[in-house]
Image (cartoon, grey):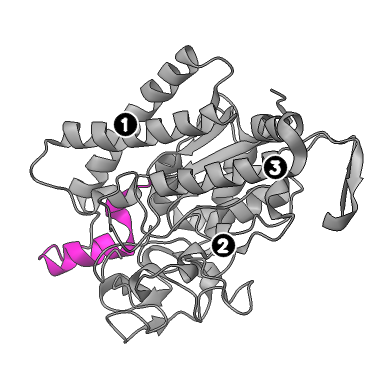
């Protein structure tokens, strides 16, 4: 979630492709295509005309793993990086960094600050519909490169993972009721899923929204509005709950209507709240304050001093923190989340976890 203001802010091939330096043999391996926001952005926003509010390609971002920083909104790796590792894939490249062979393992289209709606941070991010447009271009290139049969097999065996909707709720328009607005956001996500399905996609993994009101940025805003206890911002968290309650119904309807459509729904909200409420159980000293930022809970979005507010403090031991900045987790926290997404039980991910999803042939 690149958050607004200073507070939120396999395919089967019986051949070796020598030019690509990778031999598939007869081993089936699913590709991974990634869509969404800053939870998943590997650095796409480095390549677009935007502001530093929507970028993270400077120190101390990346300092735990990537040198130099890549543009990930984290001190190190993010969820798609771990999923790729567990699936025995290389790091999935940013759309703007696809080499000649890059798309055979998948592509990451995610953009920090992006929402399901075009209106969300319009002009500063790559919205979900534009990410779909870029995917269609990749699908076309794959067809050109490998022919209709093999590209179709790659796309149908691939896993499509989404973190989308978080940013749509930070600037809630008063012209709509909450229910109407959620319907619009989820409706846009639905149409993107259908667009990928039309191009051959069959396996879709969706993250529910996080508890948006419980980030250090939301706590800082709540504090500045007079709630000195630093509690979660309930209004935002309730919007996330409303969105999340619409996801199972939407996915079940798509499964019923579209032959071969399969989904995995990950309860990111439940997982995040569990860590927030019991930080020491998961190895953290705090889940309220960020490692990097300034102000109450280090919740002002100033990490690295390149955004509107230049002042920031950096913690000494990042592994003690659940949150790296005002709205994004640390690498250690993301790894815990990714492990549950990969092989968690039905109380957090259903009807498939990603391990079984990758093993599932279409």
Residue 218 on the magenta segment? yes
Residue 225 on the magenta segment? yes
Q: Is residue 354 left or right of residue 127?
A: right
- Closer to the camera, 10 or 319? 10
As measured in the structure, the alpha-carbon distance from the residue carrying label 1 to the one carrying label 3 is 32 Å
- Residue occupying the point 11% across, 35% down: 177
Q: Mark 2 points at which residue?
A: 96
Marked residue nearer the N-terminal end (2 or 1): 2
As measured in the structure, the alpha-carbon distance from the residue carrying label 2 to the one carrying label 1 is 27 Å
Secondary structure, mark 2, is helix
| Mark 1 burial class by Cα count in 10 Å: few <14, some 14-19, many 20+ | some
Q: What residue span does the magenta drawing correspond to?
A: 210-229
| Mark 3 burial class by Cα count in 10 Å: few <14, some 14-19, many 20+ | few
Q: Where residue 187 is drawn, which disc sits there?
A: 1
x and y, in percent, of residue 234 in the image: 20, 48
Seen as rendered, the residue at the extreme bottom is 311
Marked residue nearer the N-terminal end (1 or 3): 3
Q: Name the residue under label 3.
A: 144
Q: In which quarter of the image is residue 145?
A: top right
- Residue occupying the point 36% across, 62% down: 2
Q: In this view, does 9 lie to the left or right of 358?
A: left
Q: Quadrant of the N terminus?
A: bottom left
Marked residue nearer the N-terminal end (3 or 2): 2
Q: Nearer the viewer, mark 3 or mark 2?
A: 3
Q: Which of marks 1 and 3 is in front?
A: 3
Q: In this view, does 33 lie above or below 148?
A: below
């Amino acid at each position: 979630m690149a958050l607004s203001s200073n507070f939120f802010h396999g395919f089967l091939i019986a051949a070796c492709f020598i030019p690509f330096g990778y031999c598939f043999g007869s081993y089936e391996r699913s590709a991974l295509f990634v869509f969404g926001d800053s939870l998943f952005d590997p650095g796409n926003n480095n390549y677009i005309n935007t502001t530093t509010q929507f970028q993270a390609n400077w120190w101390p971002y990346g300092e735990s793993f990537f040198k130099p920083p890549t543009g990930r909104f984290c001190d190190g790796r993010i969820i798609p990086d771990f999923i790729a590792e567990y699936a025995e894939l290389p790091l999935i490249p940013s759309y703007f960094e696809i080499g000649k062979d890059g798309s055979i393992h998948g592509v990451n289209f995610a953009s920090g600050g992006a929402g399901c709606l075009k209106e969300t941070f319009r002009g500063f991010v790559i919205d979900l519909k534009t990410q779909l447009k870029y995917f269609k271009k990749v699908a076309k290139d794959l067809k050109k490169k490998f022919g209709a049969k093999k590209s179709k097999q790659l796309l149908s065996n691939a896993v499509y993972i989404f973190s989308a909707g978080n940013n749509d709720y930070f600037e809630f328009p008063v012209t709509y009721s909450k229910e109407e607005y959620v319907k619009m956001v989820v409706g846009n996500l639905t149409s993107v899923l259908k667009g990928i399905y039309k191009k051959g996609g069959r396996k879709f993994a969706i993250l529910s929204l996080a508890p948006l009101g419980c980030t250090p940025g939301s706590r800082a805003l709540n504090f500045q509005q007079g709630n000195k206890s630093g509690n979660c911002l309930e209004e935002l968290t309730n919007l996330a709950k409303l969105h999340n309650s619409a996801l199972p119904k939407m996915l079940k309807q798509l499964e019923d209507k579209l032959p071969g459509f399969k989904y995995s729904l990950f309860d990111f909200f439940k997982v995040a709240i569990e860590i927030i409420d019991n930080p020491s159980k998961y190895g953290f000293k705090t889940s309220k304050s960020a490692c990097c930022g300034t102000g109450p809970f280090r919740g002002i979005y100033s990490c690295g001093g390149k955004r509107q507010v230049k002042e920031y403090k950096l913690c000494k031991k990042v592994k003690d923190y659940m949150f790296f900045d005002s709205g994004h987790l640390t690498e250690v926290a993301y790894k815990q989340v990714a492990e549950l997404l990969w092989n968690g039980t039905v109380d957090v991910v259903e009807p498939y976890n990603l391990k079984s999803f990758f093993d599932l042939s279409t």
